[in-house]
Image (tube, helix red, strand yellow):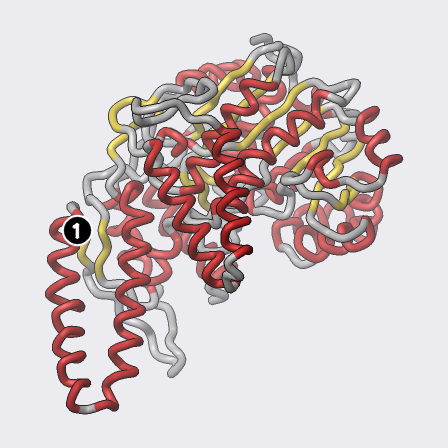
Amino acid sequence: MEFVNPLSFLKDKTILVTGATGFLGKVFVEKILRIQPNVKKMYLLVRATNAKSAMKRILDEVYVEKDLFNVQRDIFGANFKSFISEKVVAVAGDVSEVNLGVQDSKLMEELYKEIDLVVNSAATTDFDERYDFSFNVNTMGALNVMSFAKNCIKINMVLHVSTAYVCGEGSGLIPEKPFYNGETLKCTCRLEITEEKKLIDEKLNQLQAQGAAKNELTSTMKELGIQRARFYGWPNTYVFTKAMGEMILGKYRDNLPLVIVRPTIITSTFAEPFPGWTEGLRTIDGPIAGYGKGKLTFLLANPKAICDMMPVDMVVNSMIMAMTANTRQSSQIIYHIGSSMRNPIKMTNVHKFARQYFIEHPLINKAGKPIKVCKGTLFKTTASFYTYMRIRYVMPLKVLKLISVFDKKYKDVCIGHGKKIKFAMRLVDLYKPYMLFKGIFDDTNSQKLRMKVGKSGLVDAFNFDPKSIDWEDYIINTHIVGLVKYVLKG
């Protein structure tokens, strides 16, 4: 793996990026344009009806309104928009469709001639997304991206963003190894991806023939995804369809260099373009926000379990260095991008640091008063959690239902409480594999890459070493500060 300077590597390159309107995609695009303004062109594939609406979406969702690009606005000043217009081309399309959904044949020919690198970060990340939606984007989308890349004349490589949790509910040391086609996490039978596609189509046809309402169709397809995932050993539809996507890429890449980056939990920026930028309630941020608002007083999470997370800018740095190091290698390589191996942090410490932050900087309620946070309780087993839920919520609900038999005014209250409990238990069922996770992600390949970066003198510019993170300082002074500023809006 001979080292090449990433700035030299990116100069005059033309890159196709899918998922550019997503959290990781935005940070990736920002970094490329900031460190190498002499990149030739960045084609960003976005869902839109035409090129004009695609560009409008890119400008509205990525560049115009986002603080993420403030550094570049300061650099270019009044020329910022013209720079973007020169370097960025929005392409109306969809990874779930053949030819990436690009309708303009002239544009397609242009892409085939110009593209050097393909970065696929498009994904639907809901754990219980409709099986058909998740399969089309995460599995068939990977195939469509690879098919496109193989038609590109100058193609150097494909970089695919997956997730470390394609390992399922593994424990111990989890290696950076690819999936073979048809592999399952339960050794009961072979996974046939074409049969899964057939199953989805048959179920959709059946539901449509029955005249199923939209909500029934959605709930049925969601349940189908969870059932199929668990049948083969994965805990949810998201990681199941991402694993199948990796299988397809490995099977159909031929000799095209393929880099698969598997991040763990992605969090706010550590340093670039400035600390703390984030958007949306991402994985651990939902519980942190709920706790800060005084609404979440307990959680199913083993205090001793490792919360494996990496700042988004470090993930992007790893992507750039992986592309640079593996171009034209005619091989497939996996990189785990996480912290559990080199700098682990336990759930109890995440809770401790969040508590410390909200005690010192409480959120303000609608009445203008500071919200006091409780100590909070972490349940380390599902048995202890379910026991608490029965005593605290289920049994009182049964009493309330009994009262409602004699006093009808409690009927709606019962229905409302019942729905909330059902929803809460659904979330617990989806998230418990990660709150009780026992695995450590081996990052041997990533460490070799970091050593190359260290010898090059580019550590500051392309840092993705988890050892450089002081978790207490990052969570208290960077991550939650950013969460409050950009998501909770103060």
Q: Nearer the viewer, residue 486 or 224?
A: 224
Q: How many marks?
A: 1
Q: Quadrant of residue 37?
A: top right
Residue type beneath disc 1: Phe
Q: Is residue 463 visible?
A: no
Q: Position of residue 153 (x, y in %)?
A: 79, 18
Q: Nearer the viewer, residue 225 or 119?
A: 225
Q: In the image, 478: left or right of 37? A: left
Q: Residue at x 39, y 53 (%)?
A: 285
Q: Which residue is mark 1?
A: 379
Q: Position of residue 487 (x, y in %)?
A: 49, 60
Q: Position of residue 294 (x, y in %)?
A: 29, 68
> Label 1: few (<14), some or many (≥20) within 10 Å?
some
Q: Where 163 sits versus 64, above or below?
A: above
Q: Where 302 sits versus 483, above or below?
A: above
Q: Is residue 457 visible?
A: yes
Q: Quadrant of residue 471?
A: top left
Element assignment for label 1: strand
Q: Position of residue 205 (x, y in %)?
A: 55, 49
Rendered-image quadrant of the N terminus: top right
Q: Residue at x 34, y 62 (%)?
A: 290
Q: Residue at x 37, y 76 (%)?
A: 365
Instruction: Spot the residue most to the front.
Output: 209
Q: Residue at x 72, y 30 (%)?
A: 15
Q: Where 350 sits versus 484, above or below?
A: above
Instruction: Spot the residue most to the right.
Output: 106
Q: Nearer the viewer, residue 274 or 308?
A: 308
